[in-house]
Image (cartoon, grey):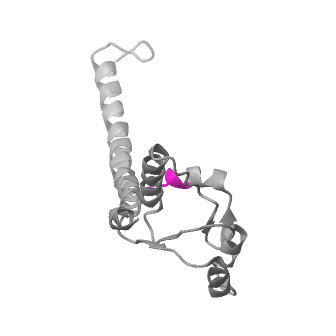
Amino acid sequence: MIKFRRDLPEGAHLLVTKNTLMVKATEGTKWEAISECATGMNAWLFVDENIASAIKSVKELQKGWAKSGVEVQFTGAVLDGKYIEPAGIAALEKLPSRKELITMVAVGIKQVPTKLARATQGVPLKLAYGTKAIADGESDLIKA
């Protein structure tokens, strides 16, 4: 467990506590939905922003423990105050990291002026090609 805690990505914290203590601590907060999965033995994983990398770390732990005969499962998650079933956690694993999101936004912002420049440059070029075709007598529509 210590090695697992050390291998967690930055912003992820693992907490082992009694379920009743966790339920009482989350009452009246946005984490109150966590009480739905507060049964049996639990370790609570709190993640700031890198949700996907934290879930991947837990998946690696599950694989390692499965080899030694210990079964570890997600019992649920809470995201923005809403409870997520164990089946929905797989979708969280596919979420992009903050750095990837910033990259996607930057690329999108950069593409707007580039596409606009290409579009505005294309109109005069096509007009010039058309004028040259008419002047050279290569146009089928208009003769010079």
Residue for point 59% across, 68% down = 42
Horizontal side, residue 42 vs residue 45: left or right: right
Q: Quadrant of residue 22?
A: bottom right
Count of numbered labels shown in the rendering = 0
Does 129 appear above or below 39? above
Name the magenta segment's main secondary structure: loop
Q: Quadrant of residue 74?
A: bottom right
Does 45 appear above or below 60? below
Residue for point 69% across, 69% down = 39
Residue for point 37% across, 64% down = 8
Which sits in the foreground, 109 or 95?
95
Residue for point 42% across, 56% down = 57
Q: Residue 116 in the image: x percent, y percent?
A: 38, 49
For the C terminus, the image quarter is top left
Does 138 appear above or below 24? above
- The span shown in magenta is 92-96
Q: Residue 71 in the image: x percent, y percent?
A: 55, 51
For the N terminus, the image quarter is bottom left
71 in the magenta segment:
no
95 in the magenta segment:
yes
Does 105 appear above or below 133? below
Q: Residue 3 in the image: x percent, y percent?
A: 34, 63
Which sits in the foreground, 55 or 109?
55
Horizontal side, residue 110 vs residue 68: left or right: left
Which residue, as the protein is rendered here, is positioned at the far right? Answer: 36
